[in-house]
Amino acid sequence: MNGELLPRRQYPMLPRDAERAITRLAAQTHVERAGARATSAVAEYAMSEVSHLKRMQGELEKICPDATEALALIANTAAMSIARSVARFGNEIG
């Protein structure tokens, strides 16, 4: 042991172009992973919002059964709008 806590691995020297390419790929991968995490978080939040919307629809239908069709139309329209917004976000990020 030469006084180092962890022994260093000896890697062959890479040409500068290869080092730059590896660095660029690592950065690109990092950005793509961040985009995937952001899209996943937005989709998860959207699903919870649609779930809340459907629960509210059910509660309102119990209070006013005559408004069932109107409430379904409103809830479905809002859910489709949320889905389109999530898809648009995913396309812009991706």
Image (spheres, helix red, strand yellow):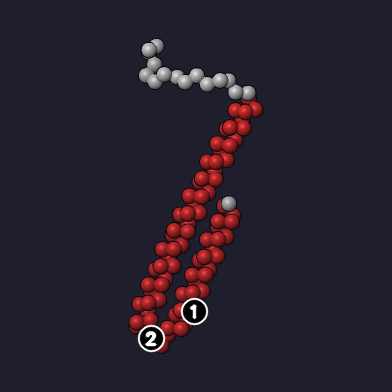
Secondary structure beneath dot 1 equals: helix
Quarter residue 31 falls in: top right
| Kind of residue at badge 1 | Leu
Residue 3: x %, y % from top left: 38, 13
Q: What residue is at 63 percent from the left and 23 percent from the top?
A: 15
Q: List the single residue furthest toward the right.
A: 17
| Pointer 1 residue | 73
**Residue 36, relative to residue 51: is it above or below?**
above
Is 33 displayed left or right of 18 in the figure?
A: left
> Residues under labels 1 and 2: Cα distance?
14 Å
Secondary structure beneath dot 2 equals: helix
| Residue 9, disc | none
Q: Nearer the viewer, residue 50 or 1?
A: 1
Characterize the local packing of mark 2: few (<14), some (14-19) or many (20 or more) Cα atoms within 10 angstroms. Answer: few
Residue 88: x %, y % from top left: 57, 60
**Residue 26, relative to residue 59: is it above or below?**
above
Residue 59: x %, y % from top left: 35, 77
| Kind of residue at badge 2 | Pro
| Pointer 2 residue | 65
Q: What residue is at 46 percent from the left and 83 percent from the top?
A: 69
| Disc with the residue nearer the chain's start (1 vs 2) | 2
Could you tell me if the residues under marks 1 and 2 are in contact, i.e. CB atoms within 8 Å? no
**Residue 30, relative to residue 38: is it above or below?**
above
Q: What residue is at 40 percent from the left and 76 percent from the top?
A: 57
Q: What residue is at 38 percent from the left and 12 percent from the top?
A: 1
